[in-house]
Image (tube, coloured by chain):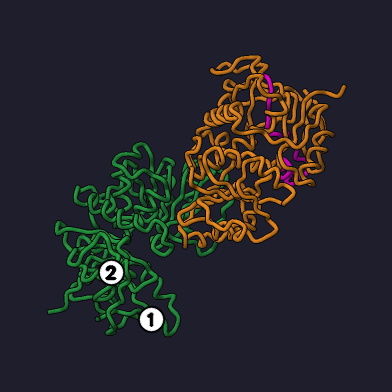
Chain colours: A orange, B green
């Protein structure tokens, strides 16, 4: 099969054997994928001669199942994010543990679905598992959430999920993204170029930091209510000053979407969360945010193009790559 | 009235005016108090000419009430921890906001009650508010907690509360404290001189770090289950490496007992928690752990003596100072 490898010098096409299926795996023909900041960041950290197939968003069809697979059959359409410990989705075919995947019907297109898994799982887990908000419609009414970087992939879904769950949502972005933020159910847009405090004019129960933890840690400490929670998907380069949390008895929660799959801890919940998200999409409560669709196949050329857009344009929403060869 | 001031050189007695009562305050005649590591640590950080009355444990009697006080009357016996922003309990009299206090009857002696407030509030808030375990009998059955430093004041109450709530409790200490730990409902005692992992032979849902965060942070990351929580009452001197949390998507929760009073955030819950703890004591579910009683009054001499014991002997449990003058 064709796979697109990443090296420190960029993407390149290569023909490789179809991946080997284990007893709990399904094999999937990838219909569409998406590129994430994770892929680009990991690529820059590759050493010489290190070549990896990235890609952690899939909508596809099952072509084979392992002998212990219980809940899926050949021919079914599925979505998933997977794990960064196995070959990613920048390939014609991929194998994935059945616990991590969810069935989807034909209600939504490949374009609508391909960008959901990684950002949807991250946003759900951060908000409803790590930050302890309640995953039920209007269950958090009266509470307030600040999102640092509301315009990115995770932010775009997280603000919609937060709104659905009843939270009043404040989110930072550049003013050119304000219209998009409002469409994604942000109540108060906050210009990240200016001081945050006067723009909020309130304190929040929780702050989700989706980029630049080092830059925004102090602001989060300042703006979060006592006994509140700061949740983050991004790590600190400099090492944060944990002592600052004590004055307000704050909590700091980390979210890494591959934890469950990599540690085999509650990994079946990822399939369940994807099902839950698809249901919310069907009900019209959340919508995928797509900035660009690239057709013509999952190729080195198309992935380089997508990576360039993601790196340089501060794109709001997802870049989808359809696995249809050029005609 | 007599008050015991702390300076960088030690404690000294001084006569001062009785503290001024505000509308939401009660004035309390201090019958007994206790000394905490907090007091000693704060004392070492005093600058020249800086003199403070510490003390954050009281059992006493109300001698006057402010004009807005709703729930208390003159003559009632109460306990509380208070706030480090006002004069502490190392004095004949003290004023405190009524939200922070709880009534007690004569079922327990001054000795039994005087050491409860600060460690009880800290243990309750850490376990049931910050670490999200459920504050109900046997509600956390099947879950596991590791306590770093189970023998100290907070540890002594925390392990009992954890056991009552259904947790399986592992706690570190020096072997000479193992009998005390077992009396305080620790299931598995862990020698802190040796590697922790082989002694536990399991992973835990949460780790409470009650001393030496810098020394035990890595062990807590290793021993806590994915998506688990590390709670701590102690800050880091060196600045912890937050990036280590991401592999398991761990959460780090801080607990500082004065947060509520100092920020006026849910401060009424402190009176409620003290009531709850007294009720658990009455039911025999938790017991105060007292290592030493000093009678003869809250004086500079007695407090110096208590501080010396606390600093040098690794005392398990509380040192109580009774406010009865020498005969």
| Above or below for B285 versus A214 | above
Residue A209 in the magenta stretch? The answer is no
Residue drawn 43% across the image and 55% down it: B232
Q: Answer left or right for B186 relative to A303.
A: left
Viewer can see residue A138: yes
Viewer can see residue B174: no
Farthest right residue in view = A327
Q: Which residue is mark 2?
A: B66
What kind of element bears circle 1?
loop
Q: Residue B62 falls in which quadrant of the image?
A: bottom left
Q: Tag 1 or tag 2, which sits nearer the N-term?
A: 1
Residue drawn 59% across the image and 56% down it: A200
Which is more foreground, mark 2 or mark 1?
Answer: 2
**10 Å crowding of disc 2: few (<14), some (14-19), many (20+):** some
Compare residues A181 and B145 and report the one nearer the observer: A181
Q: Answer left or right for B259 relative to B271.
A: right
Q: Which mark is residue B51?
A: 1
Q: CA distance from mark 2 to mark 1?
A: 27 Å
Tell me the quarter of the image containing the N terminus of chain A.
top right
Q: Position of residue B249 (x, y in %)?
A: 54, 44
């Amino acid at each position: 099969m064709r796979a697109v490898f990443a090296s420190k010098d960029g993407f390149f096409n290569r023909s490789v054997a179809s991946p080997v299926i284990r007893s709990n795996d399904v094999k999937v023909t990838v219909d569409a994928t998406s590129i994430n900041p994770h892929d680009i960041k990991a690529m820059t950290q590759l050493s010489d001669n290190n070549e990896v197939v990235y890609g952690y968003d899939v909508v596809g069809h099952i072509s084979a199942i392992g002998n212990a697979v219980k809940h899926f059959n050949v021919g079914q359409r599925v979505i998933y994010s997977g794990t960064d410990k196995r070959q990613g989705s920048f390939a014609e075919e991929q194998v994935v543990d059945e616990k991590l995947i969810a069935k989807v019907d034909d209600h939504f297109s490949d374009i609508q679905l391909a960008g959901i898994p990684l950002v949807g799982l991250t946003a759900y887990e951060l908000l409803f598992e790590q930050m302890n908000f309640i995953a039920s419609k209007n269950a958090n009414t009266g509470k307030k959430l600040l999102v640092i970087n509301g315009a990115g992939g995770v932010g775009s879904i997280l603000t919609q999920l937060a709104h659905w769950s009843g939270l009043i949502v404040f989110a930072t972005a550049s003013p050119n993204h304000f219209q998009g933020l409002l469409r994604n159910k942000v109540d108060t847009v906050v210009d990240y170029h200016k001081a945050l405090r006067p723009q909020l004019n309130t304190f929040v129960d929780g702050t989700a930091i989706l980029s630049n933890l080092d830059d925004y840690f102090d602001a989060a400490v300042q703006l979060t209510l006592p006994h509140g929670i700061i949740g983050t998907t991004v790590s600190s380069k400099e090492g944060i000053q944990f002592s600052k949390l004590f004055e307000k008895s704050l909590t700091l929660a980390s979210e890494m979407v591959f934890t469950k799959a990599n540690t085999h801890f509650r990994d079946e919940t990822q399939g369940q969360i994807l099902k839950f998200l698809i249901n919310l999409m069907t009900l019209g409560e959340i919508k995928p945010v797509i900035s660009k669709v690239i057709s013509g196949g999952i190729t080195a050329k198309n992935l380089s193009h997508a990576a360039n857009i993601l790196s340089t344009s501060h794109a709001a929403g997802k870049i989808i790559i359809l696995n249809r060869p050029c005609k």
